[in-house]
Image (tube, grey):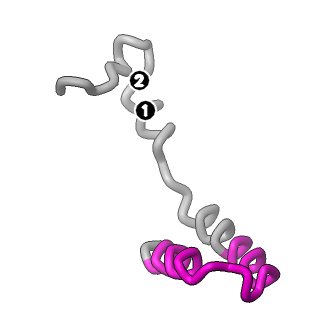
Amino acid sequence: VDGAIDYVAAGVSSEDWEALFAIDPEALNAEADDTDVFLARMGTKVPDAVKRQHEEFRSRL
């Protein structure tokens, strides 16, 4: 594909390439939980757009 990264030419196996971009659902949920705590501490200072963005992120987990 034109413009794609040629990871094979860089000596990276397809397994390592997949591992590099793997997503750990437990880690993402923990990060979202930490963000909930942080945003709660900020209280009314958090813009509605940020709250919405975080809620949308959580809904995709």
Residue 52 vertical position relative to residue 22 in the rendered view, above or below: below
Q: Residue 25 sits in which quadrant?
A: bottom right
In the rendered structure, which amino acid carries the disc numbered 1?
Answer: Trp
Q: Main secondary structure of the magenta part?
A: helix
Image quarter hosting the N terminus? top left
Q: CA distance from mark 2 to mark 1?
A: 6 Å
In the rendered structure, which amino acid carries the disc numbered 2?
Answer: Ser
Magenta region: 33-59
Residue at x 75%, y 84% (from the top left corner): 40
Residue at x 50%, y 74% (from the top left corner): 53
Q: Nearer the viewer, residue 54 or 33?
A: 54
Asked if the residues shown at circle 2 and circle 1 are in contact, with their CB atoms under 8 angstroms apart, the answer is yes
Work out which residue is located at the far bottom of the displayed protein and give it. 44
**Callout 2: few (<14), some (14-19), or many (20+) C-alpha neighbours within 10 Å?**
few
Callout 1: SS: helix
- For disc 1, the marked residue is 17
**Callout 1: few (<14), some (14-19), or many (20+) C-alpha neighbours within 10 Å?**
few
Q: Position of residue 17 (x, y in %)?
A: 43, 32
Mark identifier at residue 13: 2
Q: Position of residue 16 (x, y in %)?
A: 47, 31
Residue at x 77%, y 75% (from the top left corner): 38
Callout 2: SS: loop
Q: Nearer the viewer, residue 7 or 39?
A: 39
